[in-house]
Amino acid sequence: MKLSKRRSALVAAGISGALLLSACGGGSDDSGSGGSAAGGEGGGTFSVYIGEPENPLVPGNTTESEGDQVISSLWTGLVRYTEEGEVDYSGVAESIESEDNTTWTVTLKDGWTFHDGSPVTAESFVNAWNYTAYSPNAQGAASYLSRIAGYADLQAPVDEATGEATGEPVATEMSGLQVVDDTTFTVTLSTPFSNFPAITGYNSFHPLPEAFFDDPEAFGTRPIGNGPFQAEEDFVPGQGITLTRYDDYAGEDAAQADSVQYVVYADVNTAYTDVQAGNLDIVDVIPPDVIESAESEFGDRFIRTESSQITYLSFPTYDERFADPRVRQAFSMAVDRAAISDAIFAGTRTPADSFIPPVIDGYREGSCTYCTLDPEQANQLLEEAGFDKSQPVDLWFNSGAGHDAWMEAVGNQLRDNLGIEYTLQGNLDFAEYLPLLESKGVAGPFRYGWSFDYPAADSYITPLFTTSSLAPAGSNYSFYTDPQVDQLVVEGDQAESPEAGIESYQAAEDIINEAMPMAPMFFTEIQSVTSENVSNVRLDLFQHIVTSEVTVNS
């Protein structure tokens, strides 16, 4: 995450903040106890830090990192991904095939079941996708389904002035979805999209059991998925949830532990000290100010992971002060990314120089021409734009996730290099911060983080910088729009192969660079720590802890 993505996609503490301090401690006295059970080899219980999820635990409405971490334990999608970012058919799909990149046939494997014992069938996917896409259901990840034919018919008419729905959609099911039999369905897209198999691993495309449709609200509190862990109790806001191993799991990655306890913390610093004390087992993203000491303190329990995440300083293009691209370019050029990385992150954040990260095909070194420190040019741009330096700017970020120090460093550099004073606005927890961004509620630069929803260049362009049906709802928090970018994304989508589409996405990136609605700040390496209670801890490409692999030490 995935801040929001998902809305991946928003990304553990590096993207989103934790909310309420857990009323229960992580890593209870019985952590590490318990024998093995069918499906896994180990047993025992381990605990994981998360922040408060933004929404109930429903895949189609989970677009940020905290809920996404839990969803990743509860669900397995059609496809998964190798460590190199290639599509891996180790999920529910046997194959996803097309002769024209428009009509796709999805064939499912036999034997998959939901946690209530009901079978995972073609209808489980088709019904879930239709529910997610139907706009009155207000699912945050709905627009990821927008390429499917008939999606527009599931969207209620909207008053352009107020943004409010003015009627009902004309349909409840997308014309592009057809069930063939229990293990086969077809998907017809509105236009060709060669990367369709890759996107189907995202939350919007997960299946839902019949029980969901009986009571969606209750389901979000105690979800029923098809993944390696199951929920046998409710998620409690401010506390968390304990998931238990699903012994009838059909995948190859059966859980090794008996259970995983997700513990909600208000502040990652508190979670970190709990790992030090042995009261919590895993913190996926540790506070910046402990990175240097953590490596020596934790030894081989200090884990470095190359990340797909980009951290941005984003701009409210709807605000008069930041409507001129020259202002946004100037702010970007006034920040010494390398100095902040060295001083705050102990050199573990790489200064960003593009809108597509190095871990993705399509990265071009130095494609962000305004990411280089140049105070002289920055001041000249502000003068040309007529920017009023006498008025301070607000710098926004979510609380409790360790963003204070680097955002203050950004503010100091804006003051020193541009002569602009600043005020830190970092008092909102994650559940308040995201809705504020969605509602155009900030009037100054704001921290934003993004990790891909699926490993492809378009996952860094389409959700963040396009409009209308192309862009997943809520990801474009800068509210930037350019028809040329939209058209280039369409051209990239319709290329004969994902590789052939990269040139179009890069052309869109060049336009975005000039507009600078979001200034790339850092490519992120994730630093995690664990207690002595666990081993085999790994973060995947999406920065999820792969909970099925975690072993509890006896």
Image (cartoon, rainbow, N blue to C red):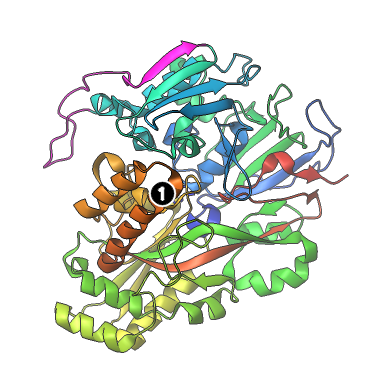
Position of 484 relative to 23 (above/below): below
Q: What amino acid type is highlighted by mark number 1?
A: Ala
At x 50%, y 14%, the residue is 210
- Res 550 quadrant in image: top right
Does 386 sit left or right of 19 as displayed? Answer: left
- Res 416 quadrant in image: bottom left
At x 17%, y 84%, the residue is 383
Residue named by callout 1? 500
Q: Position of residue 100 (x, y in %)?
A: 39, 30
Magenta residues (range): 156-181
Position of 339 relative to 361 (above/below): below
Does 97 sit left or right of 171 as displayed? Answer: right
Residue 161 is a magenta residue: yes
Position of 372 relative to 78 (above/below): below
| Residue positioned most to the left | 161
Q: For the C terminus, give its image quadrant.
A: top right
